[in-house]
Image (spheres, grey):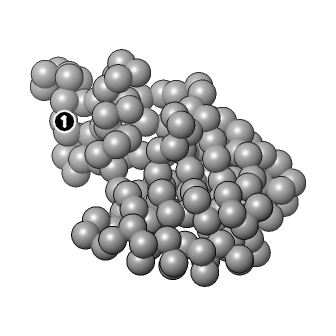
Amino acid sequence: MTDDEMWAFIEEQKSLQVATLDRDGSVHLSTLWFAIVDESIVFETYTRSQKIKNLERDSRITLLWEDGTEYEKLRGAMVKTTAELVTDTSEVHSLALEVMVRNTPGVDRETLSQAAEHMAVKRTAVVSKLASAVTWDHTKLGGGY
């Protein structure tokens, strides 16, 4: 995919797969909702979660989006990057609100803002710039593998 195609593909996706490294070096994998803020991928989660504990030790993170249920329709993007942890409650509120607005259409922003404010007290936001992307789009293969 071109950069524009990759961004369009990411915009289409609802969920993000997040891989961090556990203390023993094994991969911790989870799926989260996300938002795009200032050309960065943003998600938030409980500060006490394993992924945050892992990122506090090692900021390396791998992000994955994928779709398609048949080989000739598989598409995806994988990004290896680093994570910036945001703990300031007002900044977490702002970033959590963007995630909520993107993923809960039809709910007014004020209602979501109140929920995000409540959540921000126990959460950390993660901001990652896209770097070192690998993408694939089997729809471009034209049936030849």
Screen quadrant of the C terminus:
top left
Tell me, yes or no, if residue 49 can be seen here.
no
Q: Is residue 97 visible?
A: yes
Left or right, residue 106 beside residue 117: left
Three-letter code, disc 1? Glu
Residue at 20% in and 39% down:
73
Q: Quadrant of residue 4?
A: top left
Q: Residue at x 75, y 53 (%)?
A: 85
The image shows residue 30 at horizontal and vertical percentages of 55, 63
Q: Nearer the viewer, residue 131 or 24?
A: 131
Q: Residue furthest left?
A: 143
User: At which x and y percent is residue 6?
Assistant: 37, 30
Q: In the rendered picture of this protein, how many numbered marks are placed on residues?
A: 1
Q: Secondary structure at mark 1?
A: helix
Residue at the farthest front position: 110
Going 65% across and 72% down the picture, which residue do you hit?
120
Rendered residue at 71%/77% (across/down): 122
Residue beneath disc 1: 72
Residue 2 appears at what percent x and percent y?
36, 18
Compared to 144, does 26 lie above or below?
Answer: below
Q: Percent x, y for residue 67?
A: 30, 47
Which class describes the residues within 10 Å of circle 1: few (<14), some (14-19), or many (20+)?
some
* Towards the viewer: 3 or 103: 103
Q: Quadrant of residue 9?
A: top left
Q: Quadrant of the N terminus?
A: top left
Vertical relation: 50 (above or below) 115: above
Tell me if residue 141 comes above or below residue 24 in the rendering. Answer: above
